[in-house]
Image (tube, rainbow, N blue to C red):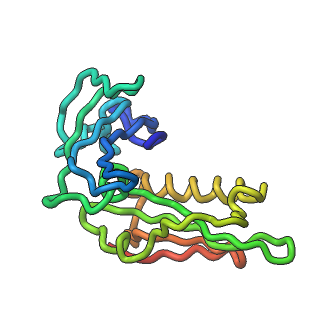
Protein backbone atom coordinates (compact mmCIF):
# COMPACT_ATOMS: atom_id res chain seq x y z
CA UNK A 1 0.00 0.00 0.00
CA UNK A 2 1.76 3.12 -1.23
CA UNK A 3 1.50 6.72 0.02
CA UNK A 4 0.64 5.78 3.62
CA UNK A 5 0.89 8.98 5.69
CA UNK A 6 2.92 8.86 8.90
CA UNK A 7 4.76 11.16 11.30
CA UNK A 8 8.52 10.96 11.74
CA UNK A 9 10.63 11.77 14.82
CA UNK A 10 10.86 15.44 13.72
CA UNK A 11 7.02 15.55 13.67
CA UNK A 12 6.94 15.97 9.90
CA UNK A 13 4.14 14.23 7.97
CA UNK A 14 5.66 11.95 5.31
CA UNK A 15 4.42 9.02 3.22
CA UNK A 16 5.75 5.49 3.13
CA UNK A 17 4.91 2.06 1.73
CA UNK A 18 3.28 -0.74 3.73
CA UNK A 19 4.05 -4.21 2.34
CA UNK A 20 2.50 -7.63 2.97
CA UNK A 21 2.79 -11.14 1.61
CA UNK A 22 -0.26 -12.35 -0.36
CA UNK A 23 -1.75 -15.79 0.35
CA UNK A 24 -3.11 -17.19 -2.93
CA UNK A 25 -4.98 -20.43 -3.64
CA UNK A 26 -5.47 -20.95 -7.35
CA UNK A 27 -7.29 -17.87 -8.66
CA UNK A 28 -8.51 -16.84 -5.20
CA UNK A 29 -7.09 -14.90 -2.31
CA UNK A 30 -7.06 -16.70 1.02
CA UNK A 31 -7.05 -14.93 4.41
CA UNK A 32 -3.62 -13.64 5.46
CA UNK A 33 -1.31 -16.34 6.74
CA UNK A 34 0.83 -13.88 8.71
CA UNK A 35 0.26 -10.81 10.88
CA UNK A 36 3.60 -9.32 9.85
CA UNK A 37 4.11 -6.36 7.51
CA UNK A 38 7.11 -4.46 6.20
CA UNK A 39 7.39 -0.69 5.99
CA UNK A 40 9.54 1.43 3.70
CA UNK A 41 9.98 4.89 5.20
CA UNK A 42 11.28 6.24 8.51
CA UNK A 43 10.05 4.69 11.76
CA UNK A 44 6.45 5.91 12.32
CA UNK A 45 5.93 8.13 15.36
CA UNK A 46 3.16 9.65 17.45
CA UNK A 47 2.18 13.32 17.06
CA UNK A 48 4.82 14.30 19.65
CA UNK A 49 7.63 12.55 17.71
CA UNK A 50 7.97 9.52 20.00
CA UNK A 51 8.09 6.10 18.36
CA UNK A 52 4.82 4.19 18.17
CA UNK A 53 5.06 1.40 20.72
CA UNK A 54 3.92 -2.17 20.24
CA UNK A 55 4.56 -2.59 16.54
CA UNK A 56 8.06 -4.01 16.70
CA UNK A 57 11.44 -2.50 16.18
CA UNK A 58 12.88 -4.69 13.44
CA UNK A 59 14.94 -2.06 11.63
CA UNK A 60 17.27 -3.07 8.84
CA UNK A 61 17.40 -3.48 5.10
CA UNK A 62 14.95 -6.03 3.71
CA UNK A 63 15.09 -7.16 0.09
CA UNK A 64 11.62 -8.56 -0.60
CA UNK A 65 12.30 -9.44 -4.24
CA UNK A 66 11.39 -7.92 -7.60
CA UNK A 67 13.05 -4.62 -6.62
CA UNK A 68 10.89 -4.20 -3.52
CA UNK A 69 12.74 -3.18 -0.37
CA UNK A 70 11.75 -2.16 3.16
CA UNK A 71 13.48 -0.62 6.18
CA UNK A 72 11.28 -2.02 8.97
CA UNK A 73 9.51 -5.24 9.85
CA UNK A 74 6.41 -4.80 12.05
CA UNK A 75 4.08 -7.16 13.84
CA UNK A 76 0.56 -5.99 14.76
CA UNK A 77 -1.34 -9.14 15.71
CA UNK A 78 -4.91 -8.35 16.88
CA UNK A 79 -5.11 -11.36 19.24
CA UNK A 80 -6.56 -13.57 16.47
CA UNK A 81 -5.94 -14.16 12.77
CA UNK A 82 -6.86 -11.34 10.40
CA UNK A 83 -10.13 -11.97 8.55
CA UNK A 84 -8.89 -10.49 5.25
CA UNK A 85 -6.23 -8.23 3.74
CA UNK A 86 -8.33 -5.11 4.20
CA UNK A 87 -8.28 -5.62 7.97
CA UNK A 88 -4.57 -6.50 7.97
CA UNK A 89 -3.48 -3.50 5.94
CA UNK A 90 -5.77 -0.94 7.57
CA UNK A 91 -4.82 -1.96 11.11
CA UNK A 92 -1.56 0.01 10.84
CA UNK A 93 -2.98 2.63 8.41
CA UNK A 94 -6.59 2.82 9.70
CA UNK A 95 -8.32 4.96 7.04
CA UNK A 96 -10.40 4.04 3.99
CA UNK A 97 -12.24 6.41 1.67
CA UNK A 98 -14.71 5.95 -1.13
CA UNK A 99 -17.49 7.59 -3.06
CA UNK A 100 -20.80 6.76 -4.64
CA UNK A 101 -21.68 9.02 -7.56
CA UNK A 102 -24.43 9.38 -10.13
CA UNK A 103 -24.86 11.49 -13.24
CA UNK A 104 -28.40 12.82 -13.76
CA UNK A 105 -29.19 15.20 -16.63
CA UNK A 106 -25.51 16.04 -16.97
CA UNK A 107 -25.13 16.97 -13.27
CA UNK A 108 -22.87 14.94 -10.99
CA UNK A 109 -24.02 14.17 -7.46
CA UNK A 110 -23.40 11.70 -4.71
CA UNK A 111 -21.68 10.99 -1.44
CA UNK A 112 -18.07 10.82 -0.26
CA UNK A 113 -17.05 8.56 2.63
CA UNK A 114 -14.12 8.36 5.05
CA UNK A 115 -14.06 5.37 7.41
CA UNK A 116 -11.50 4.84 10.17
CA UNK A 117 -10.61 1.49 11.68
CA UNK A 118 -8.83 1.43 15.03
CA UNK A 119 -7.98 -1.42 17.41
CA UNK A 120 -10.85 -0.35 19.67
CA UNK A 121 -13.42 -0.09 16.89
CA UNK A 122 -13.53 -2.35 13.82
CA UNK A 123 -17.01 -3.90 13.73
CA UNK A 124 -18.50 -1.15 11.58
CA UNK A 125 -15.99 -1.88 8.79
CA UNK A 126 -17.12 -5.49 8.36
CA UNK A 127 -20.70 -4.46 9.11
CA UNK A 128 -21.09 -2.92 5.66
CA UNK A 129 -19.52 0.54 5.88
CA UNK A 130 -17.04 -0.29 3.11
CA UNK A 131 -18.19 -1.59 -0.26
CA UNK A 132 -15.84 -3.64 -2.40
CA UNK A 133 -18.05 -3.49 -5.51
CA UNK A 134 -16.63 -2.13 -8.76
CA UNK A 135 -18.07 0.73 -10.83
CA UNK A 136 -19.47 -1.41 -13.62
CA UNK A 137 -19.80 -0.58 -17.31
CA UNK A 138 -20.84 3.08 -16.87
CA UNK A 139 -18.25 3.92 -14.22
CA UNK A 140 -18.59 7.67 -13.60
CA UNK A 141 -15.46 7.62 -11.48
CA UNK A 142 -13.24 6.92 -14.48
CA UNK A 143 -15.14 8.94 -17.08
CA UNK A 144 -16.11 12.31 -15.53
CA UNK A 145 -13.52 15.07 -15.05
CA UNK A 146 -15.45 16.56 -12.09
CA UNK A 147 -14.53 13.50 -10.03
CA UNK A 148 -11.03 14.98 -9.55
CA UNK A 149 -12.50 17.74 -7.34
CA UNK A 150 -14.38 15.23 -5.22
CA UNK A 151 -11.33 12.96 -5.02
CA UNK A 152 -9.26 15.88 -3.69
CA UNK A 153 -11.91 16.67 -1.05
CA UNK A 154 -12.16 13.03 -0.03
CA UNK A 155 -8.37 12.78 0.32
CA UNK A 156 -8.36 15.93 2.46
CA UNK A 157 -11.09 14.53 4.72
CA UNK A 158 -9.09 11.29 5.08
CA UNK A 159 -5.89 13.15 6.03
CA UNK A 160 -7.79 15.25 8.59
CA UNK A 161 -9.26 12.09 10.15
CA UNK A 162 -5.81 10.49 10.25
CA UNK A 163 -4.41 13.60 11.95
CA UNK A 164 -7.27 13.53 14.46
CA UNK A 165 -6.42 9.91 15.30
CA UNK A 166 -2.75 10.87 15.74
CA UNK A 167 -3.61 13.83 18.04
CA UNK A 168 -2.90 16.76 15.72
CA UNK A 169 -6.56 17.94 15.75
CA UNK A 170 -9.16 17.93 18.51
CA UNK A 171 -11.60 15.02 18.09
CA UNK A 172 -14.55 15.55 20.43
CA UNK A 173 -16.96 13.27 18.54
CA UNK A 174 -14.39 10.49 17.89
CA UNK A 175 -16.33 9.44 14.80
CA UNK A 176 -15.11 6.51 12.75
CA UNK A 177 -17.34 7.17 9.76
CA UNK A 178 -17.93 10.49 8.00
CA UNK A 179 -19.92 11.25 4.84
CA UNK A 180 -20.17 14.35 2.68
CA UNK A 181 -23.17 14.81 0.36
CA UNK A 182 -22.64 17.08 -2.66
CA UNK A 183 -26.29 18.15 -2.81
CA UNK A 184 -26.55 20.51 0.14
CA UNK A 185 -22.89 20.42 1.26
CA UNK A 186 -23.85 18.21 4.18
CA UNK A 187 -21.17 16.62 6.37
CA UNK A 188 -22.36 13.83 8.74
CA UNK A 189 -20.44 11.94 11.43
CA UNK A 190 -21.30 8.45 12.64
CA UNK A 191 -19.94 5.32 14.34
CA UNK A 192 -18.55 7.08 17.40
CA UNK A 193 -16.02 5.30 19.61
Q: Nearer the viewer, residue 28 or 146?
A: 28
The residue positioned 30% from the left and 56% from the top of the image is 30
Image quadrant assignment for residue 85: bottom left
Displayed quadrant of residue 150: bottom right
Q: Nearer the viewer, residue 58 or 185?
A: 58
The correct choice, above or below, for 108 with respect to 94 in the image is: below
| Residue 13, position as x, y percentages in the image | 45, 38
- Locate residue 90 relative to residue 2 in the image: left or right: left
**Quarter occupied by the C terminus:** bottom left
- The answer to whether 181 is drawn above or below residue 69 in the figure is below
Q: Is residue 39 above or below residue 125?
A: above
Q: Position of residue 184 (x, y in %)?
A: 71, 78
Q: Is residue 74 above or below residue 41?
A: below
Residue at the limit of the structure toward the right, as seen here? 105
**Which residue: 43% across, 43% down?**
1
Q: Which residue is at 39% across, 27% downward?
A: 68
Amino acid sequence: MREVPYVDAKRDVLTGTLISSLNLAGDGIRPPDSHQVWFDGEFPCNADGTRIAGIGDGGGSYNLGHGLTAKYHFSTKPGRDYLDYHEKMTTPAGIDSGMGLELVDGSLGGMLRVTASTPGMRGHVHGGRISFAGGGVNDIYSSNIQVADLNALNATLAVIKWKKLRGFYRDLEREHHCTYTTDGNQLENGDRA
